[in-house]
Image (cartoon, rainbow, N blue to C red):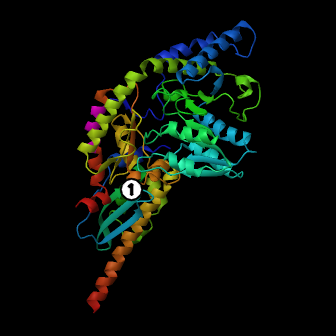
Amino acid sequence: MEYSEKVMEHFRNPRNVGEIENPDGVGKVGNPVCGDIMELYIKVDGGIITDAKFKTFGCGAAIATSSMVTELVKNKTIEDALKISNRAVAEALGGLPPIKMHCSVLAEEALKKALDDYRMRIAKSASGKAA
Amino acid sequence: MKKIYLDNAATTPTDARVLQAMLPYFTEVYGNPSSLHAFGQEAKHAIEEARCNVAAFIGAKPEEIVFTSGGTESNNFAIKGVAYARREKGNHIITSKIEHHAILEPCHFLEKQGFEITCLPVDEYGLVDPADVDKAITDRTILISVMHANNEIGTIQPIAEIGKIARRRGIYFHTDAVQTLGHLPIDVDALNVDILSASGHKLCGPKGVGILYIRKGVRLRPFMHGGDQEQQRRASTHNVPGIVGFGKAVDLAKEEMGKEIEKLTFLRDTLIKGILSTIEFTRLNGHPIQRLPNNVNVSIAYVEGESMLLNLDMEGIACSTGSACTSSSLEPSHVLMAIGLFHELAHGSLRFSLGRQTSEDDIDYVLTVLPGIVNKLRSMSPLYKKEVK
């Protein structure tokens, strides 16, 4: 098993580490049993993701995919962000070893959950306003 | 950049003196030891000398030593060799949950063929209770196999006691001594061992050579069929340079083991104390005293092993981890699970295994570098935030 240079680069210098105060969406995935836990935070303004941050407990691939997915979603519309697949994350990293592909799946799931969370909040506040 | 190798339980560098001893056997004394001419006889003389050295080192007779290709072959030979030879007598094998895969997988293989395997549990330090061994024995038990010391957590098992029980009950007793030969004194009689495996490259010898000690009178069914080398117990042309290297490695261990145990025990304890005292939320895995002199295994909470390993590697330090992330199964080390660690802590384990070349400076360097790595990873860990804030 060997990581690509791009994976190692993101692992060495992960982008967007941390949390967002008052986020518009949060996605938490993974569990201690499998050894990877990811939390993804997004800030949305006018339908555009203006900021994304992450916190991850996991291996090199888990940290690199977390870092990459935050990079990929920034400045994207919600619709475009929804189209980001685990393959796209892996490809952007110059590929992942086969046994590490599940880390990219986790990154996609974290993103989908954060986007779901955002839409739930929007729906809630809309119904709140209506009432 | 400084390069520090602390993965000696995986493999050791071949000692320069071992290499020197081996070299003539590639180009000058290249005869086949099974050949009657002078070329062959000179090679035969060399392997027999190595055999005598190894035998004397563990209190055995030369004819009780079989040279193999390494630890895995020796373990396979022991487990399957006894199972097939004693099939008429019974089908039950007792071993432990923390054995190396080279024991557990042959057992698993036999299980599919109708053998029954009992994998004994261990306590929180990784110790097998000899009373459990006694209780597990049935009238169908043909073999007990418990490792001398564990490769991951370094715990040294009460082999002599277990062997005593096996002897009293008339059952063959095998021990996997891959981590201990050349690192701890071994006397097959004092340990009550009938069969013992060891490997050359764990004691600064070459890779690709191992031994199986088989006590006189113990029958194993060979599984390498061909020529009649090794008293018809293991066919295949002898790996002459490898065997000579094994012999030389044992010679060196004979002279240097005592001092090395002293030095490594001190360095081991310095590293353990250093990690536990400078990094909070850490624990030692394995027994604090009944422990290999070269083994340090710690769990560092809230961070994952592979990401620590990669960061250490970037600083020139080589070690290993029991995290699932280095295996394809996604399950953390079976040894760490067997001692009752939570998944998070098993994933956050690091093993530093010291060697002949390890210095006090090396240990200081690890202690300088590791806290920063842990801090960096904890700062991005969602677990740390929740538990600590």
Tell me where residue A80 sits by quadrant: bottom left
Mark 1 burial class by Cα count in 10 Å: few <14, some 14-19, many 20+: many
Task: Report the span colored magenta.
Answer: B363-372
Q: Secondary structure at mark 1?
A: helix
**On the picture, is A114 further left or further right than B231?**
left
Let me know if residue B321 appears in the view. yes
| Residue at 34% over, 63% down | A39
* In the displayed structure image, the side of residue B204 where residue A14 appears, left or right: left
The image quadrant of residue B63 is top right
Residue B15 visible in image:
no
Question: Is B283 one of the magenta-colored residues?
Answer: no
Q: Please state, as top left, top right, bottom left or bottom right, where the C terminus of chain B lies in the image.
A: bottom left
Count of labels in the image: 1
Name the amino acid type tagged 1.
Glu
Q: Chain of mark 1?
A: B
Q: Please tell me whether residue B260 is drawn above or below residue B386 in the rendered image.
A: above
Please name whichever residue, B255 or A70, is drawn nearer the observer in this view of the structure. B255
Of B181 and B7, the residue lying toward us: B181
Q: Position of residue B197 (x, y in %)?
A: 58, 33
Q: In the figure, is residue A28 to the left or right of B119?
A: left
* Residue located 32% across and 29% down the image: B2
Q: Position of residue B322 (x, y in %)?
A: 44, 47
Question: Could you tell me which residue is drawn at 56 percent across and 16 percent down?
Answer: B22
The rendered magenta stretch, by its main secondary structure, is classed as: helix
The residue that mark 1 highlights is B344
Seen from this angle, which residue lies furthest front?
Answer: B168
In which quarter of the view is residue B78 placed? Answer: top right
B365 drawn magenta? yes
